Amino acid sequence: MVRRQLFLSSLFFLTTVILYAQQINNTISLNSNWQFRQTATTEWMAATVPGTVHTDLMAAGKIEDPYYRLNERAVQWIDKVNWEYRTNFNMNMDEIARQHISLVFEGLDTYADVYVNEQLVFKADNMFITWKADVKKYLKTGENQVRILFTSPVLKGMEKQELFGYPLPASNDQSEAGGMGKNQVSIFTRKAGYHFGWDWGPRLVTSGIWRPVYFETWDDARINNLQIVQKSIVKTSANLLAEVELEAPGNNLILNLNLLVNGIKVASTPVKTSSGIIKQTIPFSIQNPKRWWPNGLGEQPLYTITAELAVSGKLIDSESENIGLRTINLVRKPDAKGNGESFYFEVNGRPVFAKGANYIPNDVFLPRVKPETYEFIVKSAADANMNMLRVWGGGVYESDLFYDLCDKYGIMVWQDFMFACSMYPGDVDFLNSIRQEAEDNVKRLRNHACMALWCGNNEIETAWAQGHEERGWGWKQNYNPQQRETIWKAYDTIFHHILPAVVAANTDNQPYWHSSPSAGMGKLASDVNNSGDMHYWGVWHGQQPFSDFRKYKARFMSEYGFQSFPEFNSVKKYTLPQDWNIESEVMASHQRSGIGNLRIRQYMEQDYQIPSDFEQLLYVGQLLQADAIKMALKTHRSDMPYCMGSLYWQINDCWPVASWSGIDYYGKWKALHYFAKEACKNQIINVVIENGKLSIQGVSDLVVKTPAVVRLNLMDFNGLSLWSRPVKVTLPSNGSAVIYSIDLKELPLNYREKEVVLTVTLAIGTKETDQAFVYFAKPKDLKLPDPGIKTRISDKGDHLAIEITSQKLCKNLMLISDNTDVQFSDNFFDMQPGEVRTVTCPKTIRWEDFEKGFRTLHLKQTMK
Ligand code: BMA
């Protein structure tokens, strides 16, 4: 996103105005002094901008927190009425004297008629577009007013559905919960799909000024946009182009355009104006370029490129972009033996296995997501050794900050356009709006180093399954031939024409993939494809065993997942003690997948004893989920280079809920996220027991062969060693290989499968870099001892160190802090008999208070 420097009115500015004819292009924030009311009522209340009607009503004490217990139900009326926002503000003579005064809304949600001093300026109808207009003619010196009328998105949707003539599929639109009967009208409005409900989200259809609003005041010229094209990068130099778009409505003015790299001027060029938009290309180079690498593979150096515009020697405008020097390509080339087609990201010329997760918005009420929350989620991805997030198509094109953080932490972004699990209308206005939305967002995000892929939509190609009568989600069958043609034509136009054309025209060849999953243009994805990307839901939706992760191989696994509940301390935040049962009305309302609880139970009873205690049930549920996803991540990585990506569903939550997330709404890492951190390390071992054999797969993301030692130690739960073996191995370069295997018969198990564990440790040099605890029976059948856990907490100033000793084997030790929310450096781990381990956490309260609220839970405690 182009960052416009904010020159706030100051003494310096006033002096400048008087002394110089040319003035700086100025940004005047309009985020304050807002009020709101329901239309046709008389009570104006204070509003926060950026914000939403729901959060404003909450702040005004008119509604309760919709996330608490069943409160969501009581606020469904909000989206069925209209709302009005207004602000009064002053403009001084100097401001009014400027040649141009643009009113800019970075985001309006969604049907918004904007008035300046009661003159209609525009009618917004797309949440994802930046709305702007020159409003100079409506403004005056002194007091002015901006007023916005927000029309109900669901009533508008109803109108549009009536005009369209028949409903369109929108599987996740929880219209019934919203009191709309079968009318799933979300698809008629360009607004975040998940606001209408999803299988992990509430139905809270917001309205409001959801991103900043401001005036831009300027005179002769301004910089509209700055694109940095990376032509070539070699060791000694990077050759780039700055494509600057200027707006200068007057004639025959000589402007001076300067280009700076990290504040140092590298090029300067005169520009002659001739009424309108001017595109200026400035070639420049960076010597001895430092490359940007995905997390784990190198550094993430960024360069600040600035375009400055001067008139008569006076600087009037400036735009900056932070870029990372790198190439990212999506490589899809046929295998030598005709066995399908690759699907991998090549970064700086080398294949990179994409490790990560799918990402949804961090809240239904987007404007209240704090910068710290964005940083926490992106950093959590990086801390878990991930290198990619997929910004999924039912949410929003994220805030600039999110992509800045992905640049900073080396997280590549797979960016869906905002279309998911639905079919959309294809009338001219709708298509034009989509085109505008795509252009706005592609231009805003294209310079980011993290940007790896643009993807048309989520799961629509497979759901509709054009040309395959027997396939799809049963949508086609609801329409007559003419309707089908209309619906498919809209799909084809949006995803095969408009969106790829926008990406091609506005980026330096950034890749576009028409739908996720897909086996290729015109080829539907399935669970047995040898090309494209795959969403594998056999585990979970299809009730297949976890071991089937090994059966279904993909070139790139862009979705798979398994649900869990938030931990007990998180559940307490949105429930009362009478709700502490997963089937209670409140817990069930915070579980939006109809089959969710049933599936968790079905899988849990296969592997674990189902605890009757509520907290223990939540805990075991998290272990179950972590087991599933760890196995999938390790399996996909072991399938390298055939498979080159694994993104589980989903990293985060948008409210407190049972879901597929690895981090709950309150920021607590579930067992899954700790396990993912282990499974995503650059070099891992994957131990597989299959067909009477135990084999160890070595996986490495580094482009060197690494000599290592694997130590195997079979012991009983008291620590008595029964068999051990050190093995010299070599981890492959950027790949996977079986580095050791042994017949199970050779291990002295002696029918004690339920009482022994095999630890497998990977050592590189003197460092133990990975470890696996291998059991020979299901957790529910293990004869676990009481491990005799002892802990000692010491105060280390800014953090606490918890020394944990386990006398006997301890399975899945969970550290719990009841008095303060902290994140432990490690959690949910197994401990060997006699092991001493230190875990740390930030010190947020007094040692004594922490100590009082600290406790542990381990698997044995949940078993009969
Ligand atoms: C995937 C996603 C979401 C959904 C998830 C869990 O298909 O694309 O639509 O929330 O599955 O069912």
Image (cartoon, grey):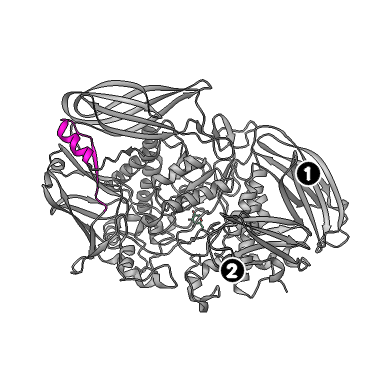
Mark 1 belongs to which amino acid? Val
Q: Is residue 295 above or below residue 36?
A: above
Mark 2 belongs to which amino acid? Gly
Other residues around mark 1 within 10 Å, as few (<14) / some (14–19) / many (≥20): many
* CA distance separating discs 2 and 1: 39 Å
Residue 651 x/y as whole percent = 52, 53
Residue 527 is left or right of residue 486, and the answer is right
Region rendered in magenta:
11-31
Residue 463 is left or right of residue 540, and the answer is left
Secondary structure state at the residue bearing disc 1: strand
Q: Is residue 600 magenta?
A: no
Q: How many marks?
A: 2
Residue visible at 79% across and 43% down in the picture = 740
Residue 123 x/y as whole percent = 21, 51
Pick the quarter of the image with the C terminus. bottom right
Decide which of tag 2 and tag 1 comes sooner along the chain: 1
Q: Is residue 263 above or below residue 497?
A: above
* Residue situated furthest bottom in the rendering: 578
Q: Is residue 585 above or below residue 814?
A: below
Q: Nearer the viewer, residue 315 or 255?
A: 315
Residue 414 x/y as whole percent = 48, 43
Pick the quarter of the image with the N terminus. top left
According to the image, label 2 marks what residue?
853
Q: Nearer the viewer, residue 667 or 746?
A: 667
According to the image, label 1 marks what residue?
710
Give the quarter of the image for residue 331: top right
Residue 595 is left or right of residue 270, and the answer is right
Residue visible at 15% across and 36% down in the picture = 99
